[in-house]
Structure formats: structure tokens, C-alpha cells
Amino acid sequence: MAQSKDLFDDSTMTFGEHLECLRTHLIRAIIGLAICVIGALFIGDRIVAIVRSPIDLALRKAAEGEGGSKIKVEDDIADVTMTDVWQWIQEGVGLAEPAENSETDGENPDSPVQTFSSIDTGNTFDRTIEISVMPSELAKALHKYNPDGYPAAKPASSDVVEKPFTIRIAAPEFQQLEAVIERQSQAVTLNVQEAFMTYIKVAFIAGLLIASPWVFREIWLFVAAGLYPHERKYVYLYLPMSLTLFTGGAVFCFYAVFPFVLKFLLGFNKLLEVQPQIRLSEWINFAVMLPVMFGVSFQLPLVMLFLERISVFEIVDYREKRRMAILVIAFLSMILTPADPMSMLLMMFPLILLYELGIILCGFNPHKPQVEGLEPV
């Protein structure tokens, strides 16, 4: 009698039943993924804002460093009359005593502050801007404009230190100016559909991350049915450790690596005197790819443990080949990260520590291969 070669002869389910079970779990996983993606579409703008936050913050800091001035927004600031301006001019050039609680006291002429604010003009709100002016220069300009209304200011004595004062000027165009300054520290799009496609892409990735526990659960329910109890035990033990390492690597990249890498890379724009314009879609790709690379590389201790358990390496090999391992880690860090030394070092040093963690994990109940021809005692 011919022997059957069906792989499912010894199982309690037929081949067709296995396919039906697989179809059921896949459908449930896809439904859960679709629900999470649809939910992510409703909050896609917030998700994009979170992903954009590192590059926006880096661009804002770079802009402040180049300009040397602070820009802040204030509301409900009263208008300033021409009489106040003339009083400040006389105080600055020595024609009048400084008023008490003068706003110019303690100001540093070398670090002016530009302030955008709103004043109520009736139907709309016009933007105002504060500028620092030297009193003598403004007095000369006013006297030249109207000699009868504004007499020439007397030269200040050498003992008087002329201080600048701030003056507010209002115009609707300042609102556009403020918007331009703010957009200089934001990512840009270069075609009409880029923002929409980026929104969809980010929502899908976010939905996949949110649905990943449910998707993994459905896949596990199908796979676990074909595993022995001791095989399922290894999954229960090492899967949470793998997820923890991956999440730790991604979070470490997002909050610790990005600030240093962006500061280093954007510094070359200042060195070359060019204005950085970061494309939104390219930043999204970078912001997704690099954390994934860090998450995968942080699996190093489990890879070492797996190779030790299947007798490819032993703990002694890991200890004796430590220098070679550091060289391999440095090479992989260079390949998996952008072409800058900062991100390479920020990946290499944690991996060296994880390599030592892998040696410690292998030391717990190490695998002891049996010598051929000898029976265990």
C-alpha cells in the first residue's frame, strides 16, 4: 500500500480547513487594519504635526541663531502717540529727564527684540512691529521732515550714553511678514498633490502601528495552532523582549538622535550661507526610515542569543571576538544611518552596550551541545 505524503495527515485539520482558517484570520486582520487607518485619517493633521516637530524645531532654532533676534507675538497692545515718541527722543538725546519706569531702561542695544502684536482698529486687527531706534537719528529725520514742528535736537554731551528706544508701527502687511517668517521654519511641498499623498501615507503608517497588536494576534492565532507547547513558550518569552527593544530603538532615535543629527546637518547650511527648504515628503520618509533602522538594529541581543542557542556561536566566541564585533557594528552603523558621523556614533555606542547585553543573556542557562558518541549522564 502506497504511503501518503500529505503533510497534514497527522494533524486534526485537513489542508482545506487550514486554508479556511488562514482566510478567516486574514480577513479579521484586514478589517482591524482598515478601521485603524480610517480612524487615523481623522487625526492625520495631528500625526503629521508630531512627525514634523523635530524638523520644525530644528529649523526654528537655526533661524533664531542666524538672525540673532527674538520674535514673539503679543496681543492687545495700546497704540503709541507721536507725543510719546517725541518725549522718548528728548530723553535719549538729553533734552529731558528720563521718565520713571522707562521701558528702555536695561535694554541691550546689541540685541534688539522684534515684537509682533495686534491692535484693534475697528473692523480688523492690524499687526504692529516694534523696532529699536536711536533717538538722535529719529530726531534728525523728524526735523528734516518738519523743521517748524520739530526743532533740531541739541548734541548730547559726551557723558550721556545714548540708548535706543522701541517704537511700534502698524500695517496690515506686517501680518504677511509674520507669516513669511514663520513659514521659513516649516517644511515645504513642491507639487500640488504632495501634501495630500503625504497625509494619506502618514495616516496609513499610523493606522498600521495602531492595528499592529491586533494584526499580530490574528497571525499568532493561526501560527500557534501548528506549534508544540515548548515552541510557543519561546515565542511568549522572546516576542515581548523583541517588541520592547524595537520600540526602545525607535523612541531613542526620535527623541535623542534627531535633535543632534538635524543640528549637525543644518549647520552646513549656515556654513555655506544657504537657506534650507526641507521637502515634507522627503522628511516623512527620513523620519520613518531612520527609527525603523534603529529598531531593527536594537534586536542585536536576541540575534546573538538565537545564534548561541543553535550552536553557531558560543559565549567564548562573543567575548574573544569583541574587537571584531565592534568593527562590524561601526560598519553597520555607517550603512544604516545617513552620511553623517553624529548619527553613526549615536547608533554605534548603544549597539556596543547591547552587544554586552547579548553576552549577559547568553550566560543565563547557556546551550551545551552534546559531544558525538557520548550519552548525557
Image (cartoon, grey):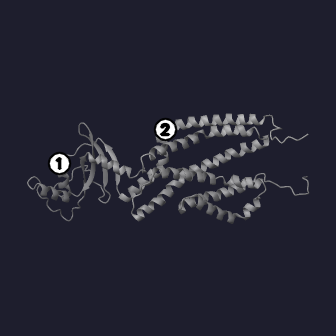
**In this rendering, position of residue 212 left or right of residue 19:** left
Residue 308 falls in which quadrant of the image? bottom right
* Residue type beneath disc 1: Met
Residue denoted by label 2: 43
Asked whether the residues under the numbered discs 2 and 1 touch, taking CB atoms below 8 Å apart as contact, a structural biologist would say: no
Give the farthest residue toward the front.
Answer: 1
Q: The residue tagged with tag 1: helix, strand or loop? A: helix
- Of 140 and 62, the residue lying toward us: 62
Q: Residues within 10 Å of mark 1 (few under 14, many from 20)?
A: few
* Residue type beneath disc 2: Ile
Residue 291: image location, x then y, percent: 57, 51
Q: Residues within 10 Å of mark 2 (few under 14, many from 20)?
A: few
Mark on residue 318? none
Residue at 49% across / 52% down in the picture?
A: 282
Residue at 44% across / 63% down in the picture?
A: 268
Residue 78: image location, x then y, percent: 25, 42
Residue at 38% across / 52% down in the picture?
A: 184
Indicate which label's residue lies in the foreground, 2 or 1. 2
Residue 339: image location, x then y, percent: 53, 62
Q: The residue tagged with tag 2: helix, strand or loop? A: loop
Q: Quadrant of the N terminus?
A: top right
Residue denoted by label 1: 82
Cα–Cα span, label 2 and label 1: 49 Å
The tag earlier along the polypeptide, 2 or 1, is 2
